[in-house]
Image (cartoon, rainbow, N blue to C red):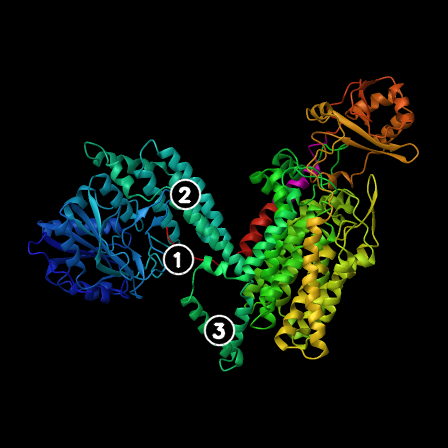
Amino acid sequence: MSAPSVPSAPSGRVVALLVTHDGTRWLPGVLDGIAEQGPALSGVVAVDTGSTDGSRDLLPGGYDLVEATSSASYPDAVRLGLERVAALAPDTEWVWLLHDDSRPAPGALAALLAAAARRPDVDVLGPKLREWPSLRRLLELGVTLSGTGRRETGLERGEYDQGQHDEEREVLAVNSAGMLVRRRVLEELGGFDPRLPMFGNDLDLGWRAAAAGHATLVVPDAVVFHAEAAHRGLRRAALTGRHTHYQERRAALYTLLVNSSAAALPWRVLRLTLGTLVRMVGFLLVRSVGEALDDLAALVAVVLRPGQVRAGRRERRDRAAAGGPDRERVKRLLPPPWLPYRHGLDFVGDVVSAVTQQASDVAERRRVAAAELDPSSQAATRLRAERERDEDDDLADSGAIARFFTNPVALTMTLVVAVMVVAARTALGQVSGGALAPAPDGAGAWWSLHLASWHELGFGTDVPAPPYVLPLALLGTVLGPTGAVSLLLVGSAPFALWGAWRFLRVAGRLVSPRGAPRWILVGGATAYAVAPVAAGAWGHGRLGLVVAGALLPWLAHAALGFAEPEPDRRRRAGWRVGLLLALTTAFAPTTWLVAAVLVLVVLGAGLLLARGLVSARDVWLPPLTAILVPLVLLGPWWVPALSTGSGAAVLLDAGRPPSDGVGALDLLAGRLGDLGAPTWAGLAMVVLAVLALLPRATRIPVTLCWLVVLVSATVGAVLGTVDLTLTATDTPAGLGGPILAAQAGLVVAVVLGAQGATRAGLAGPLRAAGMVAAAAAVVVPLTGIAWWLTGDDDLTSADASVVPAYMVQRSTTGPEHGVLVVDGSVATGLTYTVRRGDGVTVGEDEVLAPSDVDPADAATVRDFLSRPTGDVVDRLGGLGIEYVLLTAPVDGTVAAALDATSGLVQAGSDAGTRAWEVDRPLDPDAVAGDDSGSRVVLRAVLLAVQGLGVVLVLVLAAPTLRARRRP
C-alpha cells in the first residue's frame, strides 16, 4: 500500500503520545513504525507507567520522557502527556495516541492527516486496526456500543483484510491505539474518563465527542497493527489483574449508564441487569464460568456504586454545550436495537450446531487420530484424497436450493415427513383417548403438579408427579398444553426420522469410511421412525412411548461419543448421554433399566476380553456417569415414589393404566396391544437382522447390535413376569422401553448388514438372498406408513366426559366440589373415580393409579354403594363429594337405593345416566394435605437438587465454544 502524500497545507503541528508499560516484547517494532512516519510527525512524548522490564531504556533519546508510577491509569498517562505537550509545544494542534503494542504502518499518519485536510469538520480520526503479528486479520474499523454493552465492530470473527471495508465513514468512536485527535477537543472533553482505567475509555470519549457535536472518522488507508496485549492476557498490570473480562464489561456498563439520557436510565439499568443474567447463562453453556462470574461482578460493581455513575453524569452535564448533547448524532452512530438479539440467535445457532455435530464427526476424528499415528497408512492416504475431493465439491457448489431439488434422497425424506404429518392429523388440536388423558386448560396445572408434594386428586395423595410433567410444563408454557401435546404427537416421528438418519450415517462411517449408501439410510431411518406407530403406541395414545421413540436415536447418537479418541470428549459425552437418558426415562421409565444393564454387560465383557482398554478411568467412567445422571435429575420422582410406598410408578409406562399385556411373540415383533401393524412386519425385521450377520465386513458391529437386542429382550422378559397392583386395577409392568430399544437395535443391525453386503458385493445364492432381503427391507417401512395412514387409533378430539357440564363447572370452583363417578353393576362389579377440578388430565393418571386410598375413605364409598344411609351421606360430604353420577347402563338396584337415601337430591344428567346432589355440608379441607413437615422439606430439597443438577449437567455436556473475548 503506497502512503498518501501529506497535504501541501499542513493541518498543524502533530505530536505522538506514546504510553508504555512493560512492553519490551513489542516496543522495538512500535519505535520502528514511528520512525517510518517521516516529517509528518513533529515530535514524540513518551509516558512510561512504572515499567520494570527495561522499556524506558529502549526509548530513543529524542523522545521527551514522562515517568509515572505503576498505579497510573491510561487516562492519567494521557493527561500527563498532554501537560508536557502544552508546556513544550503549545502550538500543537494534533495529538496522535499510540500504545506500546500498536505498530503504525508506513504512511499511517500521512493518511490520517490527508483525511483531516479533506474533512476539516472532523476532530477525531482513527486507522484501520489489524492483528499483530498475523498482520492480515482485521480488528477494528471504528467501534460502537450496543444497548447490551457489546463492543460492535461490524466485522466477522477472524475476518481477513481484502479491502472490503476500505471506505471512510463517520463512526461513534475509534480505538485509542492510533487515534488522531485535535488537542483542543481532547482538552475540552476533559480527556479520558479516569473511572475507566484501562478498557472502554475510547468508546466513552467517542460518545462524549459525538454528543458535543464533534465528528469521528475512520480512515482505512491508515493502518496500525495492534497486539491487544492487555485484552488477550499477554500482559498483566496492577490495573487489570487476571480478570480482564470483568474490567471490559464494567467499562461497557459504566459507559452506557453515564451517557444515557435521564429518561432512558431506568430502562437501561433493567435491560443491563436482565441482559447480564442471559449472558451468564450463555457463558455457562460453553463452560466459561469465570466470564459468567466476571459479568455478574461487573454489574454489581456498577449498580451498587451509584456515586460513580452520578459523578460521571454530573461531569458530562457540566461540560455539555449550551444546547445540550447532540443525541440525534449519537443515536445515528449507535447500532440498531435489534442487533443484540441477532447475536443471541447466532449464539444459540452455534451452540445447537456444535451440540448436534459433537457425535457426527466422531468417525472423522477417529480417522484423523489414526492417520496422525501413521501418516503413511492407507487410512491417511484415503483421508487426504477425500479432503481434496471435498474442496473440489465446494468450488462446484451450485447452491442449497439447486442441491435440494436435484437430490433424490432429500426429496424422498421430505415426502416421508409430509406423509407422516398427514397420517398424524388426528392429533392436531385437543386430543385424548386410549391411554391419553385430555390436556389441562393451562400450563400452570402442570407446574403445580410438578412442584407440589400433595395433590388434591381423588381423596388426596402424596404420590409424586411423573417426571415427564416438567418438560411438558416447559413446552406448554410456550405453546400451551394443547399445542404441546399436539406437537409431540405430530412431530415425534419426523424428529425420530431426523435423529435416526444422523445416527445411522455416523454409525456407518465408524464401520467403514464411506458409510452406508444413502438409500439404505433412508429405509432404515423410516423403519425406525414408524416403529412407535407400528408397535401401537401412537394409536393407543401412549404419549410417553411416542416421545421416547423420538429421543432414542439422539440418545444413541450422543453415545457414539464414547468412541471419541480424546478423553475430554468422552467425558462430555457421558454427561450428554446422561441428560438425554434422563429425558428419555422421564417419558419411558423402563428405558433406564435397559441402559443400565447394557452398560454393565458391555463393561463386564470389556474387562474380560480387553481389560487394558476398558480399565482406564476415562473409558469406564463416562458410561457410568450417564447411568447415574438420571438418578439425580429424576430424584423428585423416584425418591418420594419409593418412600411413599408407590414404587409401582417407576415401572409404569406413561399414560392411563392398565398397560397392554405383551406376549413373547409380541415382544419379539415389537408390538404393544391390538392397534399395532401386522406381526409379520415385525418378525420380518428380525429375519433381516439375522441375515445381517452374513456379511463378514460388518459382522462385528452387527453382533454388537444383537447384543443390544438381546439385553433389551431379556429386560423385557423379566419385566413381563411382574404384575403391579394399583388402586383400581392390576397391570403388567411397562415394556415400552425394552421394545423400542430392541427395535432400534434390529434396525441398526439391518442397515449395517446391508452396508456390508453392498460394499463387499455378493455372488451366487447370496446375491439372490440379498435381493430378497432388500425387497423385504423396503416393504417393512412402507407397511408401517401404510398402517399409520389406514389403521385405527383411539385418539379423538371429541369430549369423552360423561359428567354434565354444570357439574364440571361446579367442580372447578374448589376441590370440595367433587363428583363420584360410578361405573359397572352389582353383578359385574362396581368401580368408581372421583373427579375434581377440570378432571383427570395428562400427568394425573400416573398419580392416581398407584395412590393408596385411605381405608376409612374406601369404606365410606363401599357403604354408600351397598348400604346407603344418611350417616354415610354425611361422611361422603366430609370427603368433599357434592355429586354422585351413575354412568350408563345404570344399575337399577343401586339407583333405587340411592333414591331412597336421605341427604341425596336427584340432579339433572344426560340420557342413560342418573345423578344425585349431596345435600350435606361439604368439608373445604377434605383433600387438603399437610403443608408442613418432612414431606414438604424433602420435596423442596429434591427440586433444588434437580434444578442445580440440570444446570450443572448442561454446562458439563455443552461443547467447547469459546469465542475471542469481547467486552
Question: How many numbered marks, from 0 up?
Answer: 3
Please state which of residues 395 and 129 is positioned toward the viewer in this rendering: 395
Q: Earlier in the sequence, mark 2 or mark 1?
A: 2
Q: Nearer the viewer, mark 2 or mark 1?
A: 1
Q: Secondary structure at mark 3?
A: helix
Q: Nearer the viewer, mark 2 or mark 3?
A: 3
Residue 934 part of the magenta-drawn span: yes
Mark 1 Cα-neighbour bin, 10 Å: few <14, some 14–19, many ≥20: few
- Seen at 56% across and 72% down, the residue is 514
Residue 694 position in % (x across, y down): 71, 75
Q: Earlier in the sequence, mark 2 or mark 3?
A: 2
Residue 368 position in % (x across, y down): 51, 73
Give the residue pinned by disc 2.
Answer: 299
Provide the residue span drawn in magenta: 929-944
- 3D distance between C-alphas at marks 3 and 1: 31 Å
Can you say whether 877 is above or below 381 in the image? above
Give the residue pinned by disc 3.
Answer: 386
Q: Which mark is residue 964?
A: 1
Residue 758 position in % (x across, y down): 63, 73
